[in-house]
Amino acid sequence: MVYLMSTSIRYGAIEAGGTKVICGWADEKGELLETTRIDTGLPEEVIPEVTQFFLSVSESGTIAPAGIGVGTFGPVELDADNASYGSILRTPKPGWEGANWVAPLKTLFPGVPVVVETDVNAAAIAEMRWGAARWIEDLVYITIGTGIGAGIITNGKPIHGLTHPEVGHMHIPRTEEDRKAFAGHCPFHGDCLEGLAAGPAIEARWSEPAESLPSSHRAWGPVADAIAWACVNLIFTVSPRRIIIGGGVSQAPGLFPKIRERVVKNMAGYVDRPEVTDYIDEYIVPPELGQEAGIKGAIALVLPEE
Ligand code: ADP
Ligand code: ZN
């Protein structure tokens, strides 16, 4: 086992998403040295490709990772004391139920810590360490793309609990008129947050991809309403000091001002803090790490604090 002789410190990272799995290799400062992209096919194909990546980088440099962080789509078992730590739980995603990230990596690198988080918690951790929430230890990171998820950090730690939060499936108050116009697109709940504001929901309602709807289109009012209600509910329940909103849909021009305005209106003055009354533009913000948040978050799971 030649890699044990190495002195360089390296960290492995995996960002597992619905369409692609990114594997990375970082130095002792957390800088990415190398990444690879694998299409998210079936786990029988993906997981061997992942282990092959780590095997090849570690062998070529005779380097063992000091830890491997995994930020994955869920639902995923996050209880490190559970034998199925790192397993994908019941999911409609074909073939992935029961697939496990940890065991193959442990077999490859015995004794190397493997830390698993949800993709959104990992992204939230990265934004807290290097991005839009530096020095802020109470934050929510929401991603609005093909689905909707949120990482909730309190006192610098992601919330787990019974499983992990499923903010995308939060129920959203709607007008009678809007309810009549659209039943929602979530196969489980109809008009939950994801059923109203994720990209596929917007497309289902207006028969056009979200990115092709101009900012003046009437699609955006109900979308901003749904996202704003989710923000308000999160402010009232977990009291974040900042909310970061990312994902493809968040890039729709003009969406942030619509969300911020509705958040202030819907809180009805109940939270009397300048952050939400006077500085809402700095309270609800886009991510700073962009496409790198996921993989950087996976590194942050195992990279010691400076
Ligand atoms: P994923 O969720 O698959 O990781 P994204 O975060 O890029 O990927 O989200 C993809 C979704 O975002 C698609 O439904 C797409 O229609 C929507 N989307 C992408 N870009 C934009 C845009 N500029 N404006 C509105 N919607 C967008
Ligand atoms: Zn739902």
Image (cartoon, rainbow, N blue to C red):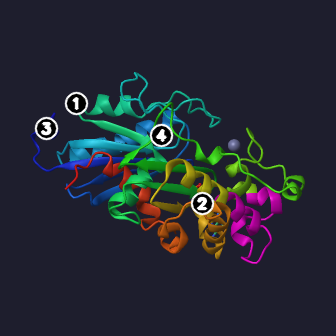
In the image: residue 35, left or right of residue 28: right
Circle 4 SS class: helix
Q: Say which amino acid is labelled 2.
A: Tyr
Q: What amino acid does circle 1 point to?
A: Gly
**What residue is drawn where x is 33% and y is 59%?**
129
Q: Earlier in the sequence, mark 2 or mark 4?
A: 4
Residue found at the far top of this picture: 83
Give the CA distance from mark 2 to mark 4.
48 Å
The residue that mark 3 highlights is 4
Q: Nearer the viewer, mark 4 or mark 1?
A: 1
User: Upstream in the sequence, badge 3 or badge 4?
Assistant: 3
The answer to whether the residues at label 1 and label 2 have Cβ atoms under 8 Å apart is no
Cα separation between marks 3 and 1: 11 Å
Q: Is residue 17 visible?
A: no
**Which residue is the site of mark 1?**
111
The label on residue 46 is 4
- Say which residue appears at 32% left-offset and 51% top-offset: 299
The foreground one among 232 and 207 is 232
Q: Which mark is first along the chain, 2 or 1?
A: 1
Residue named by callout 2? 270
For disc 3, the neighbor class at 10 Å (few under 14, some 14 to 19, many from 20) is few
